[in-house]
Image (cartoon, rainbow, N blue to C red):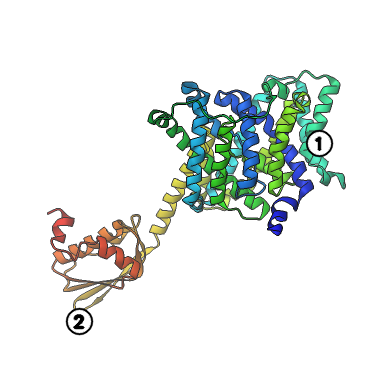
Amino acid sequence: MVTSLKANWLSNIRGDVLAGIVVALALIPEAIAFSIIAGVDPKVGLYASFCIAVIIAFVGGRPGMISAATGAMALLMVTLVKDHGLEYLLAATLLTGVLQIVAGYLKLGGLMRFVSRSVVTGFVNALAILIFMAQLPELTNVTWHVYAMTATGLGIIYLFPLLPKIGRLIPSPLVCIVVLTAVAMILGLDIRTVGDMGDLPDTLPIFLWPDVPLNLETLMIILPYSVGLAVVGLLESMMTATIVDDLTDTTSDRNRECRGQGIANIGSGLLGGMAGCAMIGQSIINVKSGGRTRLSTLTAGVFLLIMVLVLDQWLVQIPMAALVAVMIMVSIGTFSWGSIRDLKDHPLSTNIVMVVTVVVVVATHNLAFGVLAGVLLAALFFANKVGHYMAVTSEYEEDTDTRTYRVVGQVFFSSSEKFTESFDFKEALDKVVIDLSRAHFWDITAVAALDKAVIKFRREGAEVEVIGLNEASATIVDRFGVHDKPDAVDQLMGH
């Protein structure tokens, strides 16, 4: 118990606290921006980010990962808020949490094993592009001061760590924010600040039960949105957990993370916040700034609320250029530059999956669509590739007028046609032996192909013997096969 407490909370106090402060600063403008996207008051996004970050610090399955209000989730809320209002959004947030908890207990977090590395790489690259694109509005139709401040911020971020001793003690993104804010205030620069994004809340969040009718009609309204929010939230959270696992060389409990995300969203909905999930950008900021344990996530949530309530007069003066510089650093650090170099070495199918994932995500601004496209494409390529690892050879015994076909490899929907075409049904034989001792049958398509082969040989007058089926293949053939059942020819050939 004590060892676990120390490992999860007290093993990296200075790094976690400093990283949490940097993340909290970066969360403020994003939470406000995501609230605007969803069509709700900025307080909804800020309360959500505070609640989710604090709760997930205790119940999440991935230490050091940051969860809060996100753009991917906000995009799914637009129509619901527009058509039905904030109360229905809060109700949908609660239902989203329930669905995610159910997903955790059903161990759906394990489905991440079906997401190939090329899909994860495409997801990361697309997210890096989206993060950079999200900064462009802050860099268009602005004065030269903004460009100078942004460039200076990037210089601080990348050069400050090179300073001896002090460069490793303080996260450079925090230095960037403090220095640029001081410069903007001293010089009185007329540039866009956090205060221009919207009003900050001035009170603690309070318990709110959604003011909606508790009936089937309400459920039918919010259910489609809640399902979408639950899927996208878990997908982005699992992807982010995978990336943070790689960055920190540690493992995470994905099913616990599913349950944790659900509990956090229920807490957010009850305190007037919108649904959220893990944030890859902020999680990378956290890790890059030295955050490793649950303390960094808790610090981010607590400091977010403290700064909003206590330091609001200072926060509103932070130039957006400083935060843009931090987010550009995040996009540069997020993008897998090695994937471009690997294009010439990796198989074409891998490259296609990665590129399609990037294109779909960037085109739709929906991470779920891109990942789904990548997973489906990867599955098709895999099935096609495995389908080629099947061969049929034959050997003729003249004494007994018997031909033995030996099947090697995997027989399933992708290779079943090749399996059938490997037999010569017109050859006049007394007996045909189909040796399956080195083959495996996976699905009913494969069983149907075997049925067709056996029945066609029998129709030509040959005696057919099937030998060598392993236990698993024999089970599926016995259950679904028809070649040894009455009227099999009529059933299969349609006569």
Tell me: residue 295, above or below residue 220: below
Residue at 16% in and 74% down: 430
Residue 175's label in the rendered image is 1
Of the pair 122 and 172, the residue shown nearer to us = 172
The quarter of the picture where residue 42 lies is top right
The quarter of the picture where residue 167 lies is top right
**Can you give x and y, in whole percent of width and height, for residue 350 in the image?**
51, 50
Residue at 74% in and 19% down: 143
The quarter of the picture where residue 267 lies is top right
Q: Is residue 433 left or right of residue 223?
A: left
Name which residue type carries label 1. Answer: Val
Of the pair 253 and 59, the residue shown nearer to us = 59
Residue at 66% in and 38% down: 331
Q: Nearer the viewer, mark 1 or mark 2?
A: 1
Tell me: residue 289, above or below residue 200: below
Tell me: residue 326, above or below residue 437: above
Q: Is residue 137 left or right of residue 378?
A: right
**Can you give x and y, in whole percent of width and height, for residue 443 in the image?**
32, 58
Q: Are marks 1 and 2 in contact (CB under 8 Å)?
A: no
Q: What secondary structure is marked by label 2? A: loop
- Can you say which quadrant of the picture contains the N terminus? bottom right
> What distance separates the C-alpha of mark 1 from that of mark 2?
89 Å
Tell me: residue 12, above or below residue 73: below
Count of numbered labels shown in the rendering: 2
Name which residue type carries label 2. Answer: Asp
Residue holding disc 2: 399
The reply to whether residue 356 is in sight is no
Q: Residues within 10 Å of mark 1 (few under 14, many from 20)?
A: some
**Can you give x and y, in whole percent of width and height, for residue 464 in the image?**
20, 70
The reply to whether residue 415 is in sight is yes
- Can you say which quadrant of the picture contains the C terminus? bottom left
